[in-house]
Amino acid sequence: MLKKDLELKDTMILFDRDIGLSIFQNFRGYNNLTDDAEWLLERTPQKSKGFLIRSVSRDNEEGIWIGEYNYGGNQIDRQDLIFNNVGSALSKLIAGYADRRISEKKFMEKIAIESLKKKLKSSIIQEFKYYTCPPDLFYNSCIHMEKVYRELIKKYGKDSRINYMLIVEEIARTKPCEDVIICPLMVPNFFEEVLNLDKALKSRQLGAIEFLTSDTAKIT
């Protein structure tokens, strides 16, 4: 893929199946998309499978480059170059974050994988899944956790005391997340499922699940 006519920006975003999202700013490389990406991958530990995003421009048109890497490799296997309204908006978003014109909270919401999947038709993006849901995603933006809590409050009321298996049953009704393989709400251990729900609720100050006995829990 010839990139001689592209201007490469100095922010790289890495989405990894295991380690989650990482942002590298003020990146100075070889001014070559694949060489720069592979140089960065060689120096990034614990990665498994994922992709990188980098802002680019061509003839005053903004866009993004996406490069995919696979298990244990430091090589880019697939690439997408996107110059359209979505690519331009994403490139400007990244520049705004780098220049501190956009808050980290707003940026993380817009760059989240579920948001990218709604906007970008890239097969690299659409096929990506986290192996285990990253803590940032689960504790800060998981909509399934909120839905489970709302249903529990609706059915049993706040401060209710119920058998914790009723909570497990409500979790089981939740549609599995399309962005991860292993969800903290879908682990084999039922007790751990409820504990993970409790941690997520507390992290957002929505409520809590308090164990009263080995089989009874209180919804607050």
Image (cartoon, grey):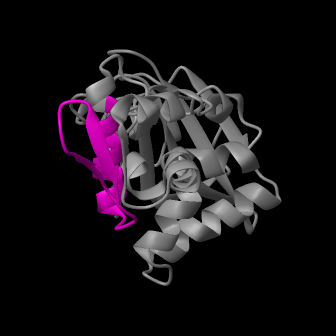
Taking depth in this image into account, of 197 and 47 the one nearest to the observer is 197
| 37 lies left or right of 218 | right
Farthest residue, direction left: 213
Q: Nearer the viewer, residue 110 or 209?
A: 209
Q: Quadrant of residue 35?
A: top left
Residue lying at 58% horizontally and 61% vertically, measured from the top left = 110
Query: At 63% from the left edge and 42% from the top edge, which residue is drawn?
Result: 3
Stretch of the chain drawn in magenta:
193-220
210 relative to 55 in the view: left or right: left
The quarter holding residue 2 reads: top right
Q: Measured along the vertical axis of the image, is residue 147 above or below residue 132? A: below
At 44% from the left and 71% from the top, the residue drawn is 105
Give the quarter of the figure containing the C terminus: bottom left
Quadrant containing the N terminus is top right
Q: Is residue 194 magenta?
A: yes
Residue at 61% across, 45% down: 114
Q: Residue furthest right?
A: 84
| Residue 182, image x, y percentages | 42, 24
